[in-house]
Image (cartoon, rainbow, N blue to C red):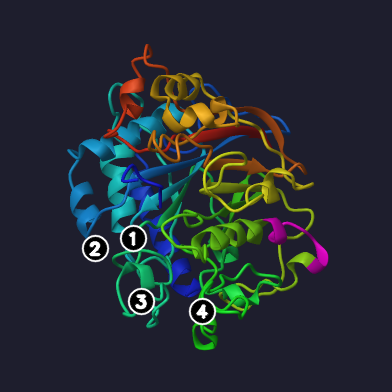
Amino acid sequence: MTMRRRTSLSAATALAVALSALAPAAAGHPGQGHGPGKGHSHAHGQDETLRVATYNLSLNRATEGELRADLATGDDAQAATVAEVIQRADPDVVLLNEFDFDAAGTAVDLFRENYLEVGQGGADPVTYRFAYSAPSNTGVPSGFDLNNDGTVGGGDDAFGFGQFPGQYGMVVLSKYPIATERVRTFQHFLWKDMPGALLPDDPSTSEPADWFSDEELEVVRLSSKSHWDVPVRVGRTTVHVLASHPTPPTFDGPEDRNGRRNHDEIRFWADYVTPGKASRYIEDDDGGRGGLHPGAPFVILGDQNADPHDGDSYDVAIDQLLEHRRIEDPLPTSAGAVEAAALQGGANLAHTGDPALDTADFADTAPGNLRADYVLPSKHRLRVQDAGVFWPTLEDPSSALTGTYPFPSSDHRLVWVDVSV
């Protein structure tokens, strides 16, 4: 879910198996597997270079089933544009944010077959034989008045904001095998079960942390979409793709329920990759306890909706990851972001962060362009080789893919990092 200019695991596993099983049907297309990509190469010795990316491609739709219909043919202009961005970046593993979920995985298959596996705008096709998708909390009715407006129902009373179940969902695409049987999801983890959770407070009462009733706290989930640990097998090494999309820290009131939730959704991964007491409280949707094994390499991916210097996120929200002792910040940049901040002015002129690090083109009045999207590898067993943001300058013909508002693709930019495994 973006800040726009308007200023059960068993089911998930079944879907991933179905998606992976369907992939060989497209195996005859060029670009299958993990061959050489544009701007990066794969070593044949001990180390292998892996390009990992995150892309909030805004491929969500207003009604359930609309995305499937749009992708059924190859003539959807937005889908073709975001597919070309992916083709030109050519990541080996990519997390797609804001891709509507459907239980059959039809939309994922259609996007691969009709767009990614067909060259767009002169770019080479790309094939992802493996895909993982699972249910999202977005649009799932809670049965409670979570925004305290006196009525029950609608997107703001769902477990995660959405007009129908699965809107603004997520997909992991990979050229490498996904260890589906080892995926962990945390869709149902309750917010109250995080020790020291920043639960919102009703400012009209003297009681602390009382925005939600006791009954509501028994159902309110931490994740606005979901948190996934998706193991990807790269040669003899398993890299854990930690995927999420925290809520924007806006669209609420003085209780700051979205800002606080954003902070704690980000904190979840900081705790998950910390061995010992910090991660003992965590329980996955199958009842498995604890965090990630201390020796496991990982990459945290997603639109975190938090900038370390600017915007509306809760204090130090993203710093929980950027300053974590086990996490590397590759500091991906682009010249296009610097150019856009200067040309658009407005809120950008008051920002204190480096505009080269921006990944999202938001409203010029507020909040301005921000660093919202992250690819953060572990310091252990992964070595950063290169990093960047797909945000071309205006003189580059590829800038037509990012454009200006109303965007031909998305208000976010694809972020990629090359690591040796």
Q: Residues within 10 Å of mark 1 (few under 14, many from 20)?
A: many
User: Alpha carbon of mark 3 to alpha carbon of mark 2: how far?
Assistant: 15 Å
* Mark 4 or 3: the one toward you: 4
Region in magenta: 270-277
Residue type for callout 1: Gln
Residue annotated with mark 1: 167
Which label sits on residue 205? none
The reply to whether callout 4 and callout 1 are in contact (CB within 8 Å) is: no
Discs 3/1, front: 3
Q: What distance separates the C-alpha of mark 2 from that of mark 1?
A: 8 Å
Q: Find out whether the residues at labels 2 and 1 contact each other: C-beta distance under 8 Å.
A: yes
Disc 2 marks a residue whose amino acid type is Glu
From where the camera sits, is residue 268 visible? Answer: yes
Three-letter residue code for mark 3: Pro
Mark 3–mark 1 Cα distance, whole angstroms, equals: 13 Å
Q: Earlier in the sequence, mark 4 or mark 2?
A: 2
Q: Between marks 4 and 1, how big is the CA–CA gap?
A: 24 Å
Name the residue beneath numbered marker 3. 141
Q: Position of residue 73 (x, y in %)?
A: 17, 44
- Extreme-right residue of the structure: 276
Q: Main secondary structure of the magenta part?
A: helix
Q: Is residue 298 magenta?
A: no
Q: Earlier in the sequence, mark 3 or mark 2?
A: 2
Q: Earlier in the sequence, mark 4 or mark 1?
A: 1
Q: Position of residue 62 (x, y in %)?
A: 23, 57
| Res 389 visible | no
Which residue matches tag 2?
A: 64
Q: Magenta includes 276?
A: yes
- Against 394, residue 8 (above or below) is below
